[in-house]
Structures are given as structure tokens and as C-alpha cells.
């Protein structure tokens, strides 16, 4: 994806008539045309009604313990969101002030922040910038803004539609549907679409008499009829899979990247490229719970595991995801969505940006390009609430921010919708297509039932305020296995919010996350104490109880008690 600088030179002559006040602030000869600061305003992506920009300010004066950059637009540009700075706008005037973590600006030092904005007509670059009221030089990039028709614009994705879910039915897996319908009350949701999981090589042909990939695709053609239909398939078999979660370890060892390519991805790509299935919109969810582990669960983090250190060192997660994106992206009717964790995993500053950078690295590995990525998916097989209505990240109680509460613990996001929308903007700023869409898995994040809060908590202190009002009732957002109290979430639907392609049920409700105790199996799936209801935790969940249901089978197997729990606590309720 091309990235064109759009800065213009703002000569110091612009302030020459202002009694030299800007120049007087510069150390040295008052008569010299010294530059107190430099701003590089870089429009990275631009489309018909919006754009993203990166701004780097370099301080040539004395060191600063805080800073604010100001500029004024000549047109109707509006900043809609930002990162690495607190950005406010009044009319055409915009101010970007430091965050707490980047407040220091040394002499000769730089700070970079970014934002997404909207506009109509022209998107002229501001002529003047100030740093703490002092006018800066603007770095000259030498080119005009990228025109939407510029041949250097992001490559298109063939005849793919912007959002595959718009105007389409979504495939109902008959095997899951039968399991759901067999449960008391399950008929009410048995017609909902869910993901088809290729969680080992045998799943391609169909293990133990179950439907294989071609069987599902043939059934999808039958369900499609004369309209459009989305078929959702989970690509989930990396070498050394799930290096931090033993319950979903896979069949391939850490070094078996060649087997992953030739025995798993290549056969799937061959089937999906069969012209017989060309009329389907095939959505792939690529390798959940993989790439973020290389950021959060490696040395020197206290959450590090030897397996994750191994996978970071050998690069096989990045290679595997890149290879899958490349091969599957070559199929014209395939829409690749890369797993992007969830807010309770990646919402912190030291996780958010590095993970986005890693997604870009994987999307350009093994012959893949960003054009092979149609979007990203958040909260896959997880429980994070879609939207917390009773508190927000900007609230404070007794002088303490919500971010200081034990539950939020300095995270920048309190729910999946805000996280997914912010991550999308960050990814676009890194070079992904501006039309990149997000999916959110809402299969188990409803948190309804009798205990669902109806208003904010008491303002006794910030913890009672957050805990009394939060929908997500886990002990900790790090808890991921068969959670007690969880409920079905929003039903699958297309285009529910800006930037969100769909709410989906990728994790089929009622299929276990992992066994409550060690169970022998031929699927390579281990036992993780996070699935044990008696487990008191580890650094990944701040040493809280696991919150898991008891008597669970191995991951992917039907778990009736979990299904009933989800049905009972559904929100919106199941009618």
C-alpha cells in the first residue's frame, strides 16, 4: 500500500511580520532564521471522504516535560479519532497534547502521533503548526496528497465486495445445528450461522464420519439458492499452535512449518479454489490466538512461556500466517480475516501497537501482501463484552480514572467495540486498506441473566463504580476457558457499527474451550489449568480464580452444560 507524504514548506517568513516573536524563542542569534521545531505532517492514506495522517514533531529548543502541537485546517477536515496523543478540535483548530507516557520531549527529540479524519472537497495540508505556541517549520515532502485514482493506491481485491456480509445469508453448519436443536430450548437458536473449524488436517476430509470441507461447501451451495451466501471457515493448525494455552495445542510440532504448508494449507486452498464454489463468499478466520502470543507471552514478560519463546525465535507463526494469507488470498472469492485477539489481551499500550506492527509483518511474509487481508476479527472464542454502557474509559470517581480500577487495570479500552474500531484505525495507519473491516465474535459475550447490571455502580470509589456496572462478570479479562455466567451475545448481523463488517458466531456455542482435567485424546489437545475450576490463576489473569465450568470435555467437543449456561444468560435474551 503506497504511503505518500503530503507536507508543505511553511517558511519562517510567515511570522516575520509578527515582531519576530516566534524566532525570539529560539536560543542563539535573534536575527538568525533558526528553526525552533519541525513538523512532518504525513497523509498516509486518503479516500473519498476520509484520511489517516501521521504527525512527527521534532523539538530543536530546550527539553520539554509536556507539549502540545496546534494547527488550523483551511477546509472542513474533522479529526474523528487518534492515537499517541490527546487530540481535541474546536472549529478548524486542532490541538494534539502529549499522553502521560510520551510527555518528555528532549532537545533534538521527536514524538509521533496519528489520527483518522473526515473531509469533503479538498484535503489541504495545514500551512502552519505550533509547538507550545511557537511556530514550527514544516518538513517538505515534495508531493501532493494521494489521489484516490492514483495507480500507487492500495491494490484492489479483484471483484470482491467491500463487505461480504452485506446482502448475504450466512452458512448454518448442520452438525452444530443438530447439537443445538437436541438441547432443551436449543431450537430457538439452532438456525444461527457459526464457523466451521479446520482444527487439524483430518478435518479437511472429515474425521470419524463427520463432514469434511467439501461436504460443508456443497451444503453451502444448497443453502445459498439464488442469493448470496457467506461460508465461514476457521484456519487453525499452526505448528506449535497456541503456545500459551495447552488446552488447544495442535497436531504439528514447532518446526513442522513445511507440513503446515503442504499437508494443510495447500489442500484447503485447492478445495476453496474449485470453480464449483466460485459463487460463494468464503470468509476465512486465520489462526486465532497465535500472533499476539509473540508480543505478550515471550521473554522478558512475566507471562512468558518456553513454547512462545520458541515460536518467536523460529518465526513459524509469522511464516505460517503469511503463507496462508498468500495462498488463500489468491482465490478470488476468499475474504481473509486475521485474528486480532481482544481488548482484555491487547488493549494496553505495550501490547496494542506492537501487535498491530506484527500483524503487518505477517501480512507481508511468505509472498503475502496487505491486499491479501480483507479484515481482522476480535474476540474470537472469547467472552469480552461488546459494549459496556455504564462506565467509559474517560470516567473518574473520587479523582481516580476508570483506568486505575482493578478491573480495567490501565487498559485503554473497556469493551470489544471500542477496541475493534480503534485497532482498525491503527491498522489502516500502518498501510492496510482504508476499507479494512472488522468482525467481532459475539457468540458468548452477552452476559445477561438476572445478574446483568441495569446502571452504574456506586461512586464509593472507582472499583465499586466499575464492578457494580460492568456486564462482563469474569474474575479477570485474562480468563478464557468455559466461563461461568457467560451468555450468548448479539445475534450475527451485517454492518452493525461503523468499521464493523459483522457480528459473527465463529466459536460455535456449546463447544468446549478445553477439558477441566487431563483427558487422553488423539487430537493433540493438552490440559490447561485455566480450564480447571479450582485453579487460582497465574500472571496472565493476575492470579485470579479461573472461573471455568467443571466437567468439561476437550476443546471443540460438545459441552451441554456450557450450552445451557449460554442459553440462560443470553443477551439479548432468547425468545
Image (spheres, rainbow, N blue to C red):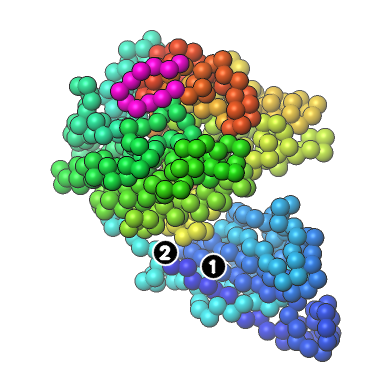
Residue 525 within the magenta-colored segment of the rendering: yes
Vertical comparison of 389 with 527: above or below: below
Q: Main secondary structure of the magenta part?
A: loop
Which residue is found at the position 55% from the left and 27% from the top?
479
Left or right, 478 with respect to 258, comes to right
Vertical comparison of 454 with 235: above or below: above
Kindly indicate the quadrant of the structure image that contains residue 523: top left
User: Where is residue 421 shown, x and y percent of the image?
Assistant: 53, 46
The answer to whether the residues at label 1 and label 2 have Cβ atoms under 8 Å apart is: no
| Res. 188 visible in picture | no
**Of helix, strand and loop, which one carries label 2?**
loop
Left or right, 351 with respect to 85, comes to left
Kindly indicate the quadrant of the structure image that contains residue 514: top left
The numbered disc on residue 411 is none
User: In the rendered structure, which segment of residues is drawn in magenta?
Assistant: 517-527
Q: Residue under label 2, please give it.
A: 1
Which residue is found at the position 25% from the left and 50% from the top?
331
Residue 511 within the magenta-colored segment of the rendering: no
Foreground label between 1 and 2? 2
Amino acid at each position: 500500500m503506497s504511503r505518500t507524504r503530503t507536507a508543505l514548506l511553511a517558511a519562517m517568513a510567515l511570522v516575520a511580520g509578527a515582531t519576530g516573536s516566534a524566532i525570539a524563542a529560539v536560543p542563539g542569534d535573534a536575527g538568525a532564521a533558526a528553526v525552533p521545531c519541525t513538523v512532518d505532517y504525513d497523509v498516509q492514506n486518503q479516500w473519498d471522504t476520509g484520511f489517516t495522517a501521521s504527525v512527527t514533531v521534532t523539538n530543536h529548543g530546550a527539553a520539554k516535560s509536556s507539549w502540545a502541537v496546534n494547527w488550523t485546517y483551511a477546509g472542513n477536515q474533522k479529526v474523528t479519532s487518534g492515537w499517541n496523543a490527546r487530540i481535541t478540535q474546536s472549529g478548524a483548530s486542532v490541538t494534539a497534547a502529549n499522553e502521560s507516557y510520551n510527555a518528555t520531549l528532549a532537545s533534538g527529540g521527536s514524538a509521533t502521533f496519528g489520527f483518522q479524519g473526515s473531509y469533503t472537497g479538498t484535503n489541504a495540508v495545514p500551512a502552519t503548526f505550533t509547538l507550545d505556541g511557537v511556530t514550527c517549520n514544516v518538513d517538505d515532502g515534495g508531493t501532493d496528497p494521494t489521489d484516490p485514482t492514483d495507480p500507487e493506491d492500495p491494490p484492489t481485491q479483484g471483484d470482491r465486495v467491500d463487505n461480504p456480509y452485506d446482502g448475504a445469508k450466512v452458512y448454518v453448519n448442520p452438525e452444530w445445528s443438530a447439537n443445538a436443536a437436541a438441547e432443551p430450548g436449543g431450537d430457538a437458536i439452532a438456525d444461527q450461522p457459526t464457523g466451521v473449524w479446520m482444527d487439524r488436517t483430518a478435518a479437511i476430509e472429515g474425521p470419524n464420519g463427520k463432514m469434511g470441507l467439501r461436504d460443508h461447501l456443497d451444503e453451502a451451495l444448497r443453502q445459498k439458492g439464488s442469493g448470496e451466501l457467506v461460508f465461514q471457515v476457521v484456519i487453525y493448525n499452526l505448528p506449535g499452535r497456541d503456545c500459551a494455552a495447552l488446552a488447544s495445542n495442535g497436531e504439528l510440532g514447532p518446526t513442522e512449518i513445511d507440513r503446515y504448508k503442504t499437508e494443510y494449507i495447500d489442500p484447503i486452498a485447492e478445495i476453496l479454489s474449485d470453480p464449483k464454489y466460485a459463487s460463494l463468499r468464503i470468509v476465512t478466520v486465520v489462526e486465532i490466538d497465535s500472533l499476539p502470543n509473540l508480543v505478550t507471552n515471550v521473554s522478558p514478560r512475566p507471562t512468558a512461556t518456553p513454547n512462545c519463546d520458541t515460536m518467536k525465535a523460529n518465526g513459524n507463526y509469522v511464516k505460517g500466517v503469511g503463507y496462508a494469507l498468500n495462498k488463500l488470498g489468491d482465490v478470488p472469492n476468499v475474504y481473509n480475516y486475521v485474528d486480532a485477539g481482544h481488548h482484555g489481551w491487547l488493549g494496553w499500550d505495550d501490547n496494542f501497537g506492537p501487535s498491530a506492527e506484527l500483524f503487518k509483518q505477517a501480512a507481508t511474509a511468505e509472498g503475502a501482501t496487505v491486499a491479501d487481508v480483507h479484515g481482522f476479527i476480535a474476540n474470537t472464542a472469547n467472552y469480552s463484552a461488546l459494549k459496556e454502557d455504564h462506565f467509559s474509559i474517560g470516567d473518574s470517581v473520587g479523582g481516580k480514572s476508570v483506568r486505575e480500577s482493578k478491573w480495567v487495570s490501565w487498559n485503554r479500552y473497556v469493551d470489544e467495540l471500542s477496541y475493534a474500531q480503534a485497532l482498525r484505525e491503527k491498522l489502516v495507519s500502518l498501510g492496510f486498506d482504508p476499507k479494512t473491516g472488522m468482525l467481532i465474535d459475539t457468540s458468548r459475550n452477552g452476559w445477561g441473566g438476572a445478574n446483568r447490571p441495569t446502571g452504574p455502580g456506586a461512586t464509593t470509589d472507582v472499583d465499586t463504580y466499575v464492578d457494580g456496572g460492568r456486564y462482563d462478570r469474569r474474575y479477570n479479562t485474562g480468563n478464557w476457558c468455559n466461563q461461568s455466567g457467560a451468555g450468548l451475545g448479539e445475534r450475527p448481523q451485517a454492518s452493525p457499527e461503523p468499521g464493523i463488517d459483522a457480528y459473527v458466531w465463529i466459536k460455535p456455542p456449546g463447544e468446549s474451550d478445553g477439558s477441566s482435567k487431563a483427558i487422553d485424546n488423539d487430537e493433540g489437545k493438552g490440559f490447561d489449568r485455566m480450564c480447571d475450576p479450582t485453579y487460582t490463576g497465574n500472571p496472565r489473569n493476575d492470579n485470579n480464580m479461573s472461573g471455568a465450568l467443571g466437567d468439561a470435555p476437550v476443546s471443540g467437543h460438545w459441552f451441554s452444560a456450557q450450552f445451557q449456561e449460554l442459553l440462560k444468560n443470553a443477551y439479548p435474551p432468547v425468545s
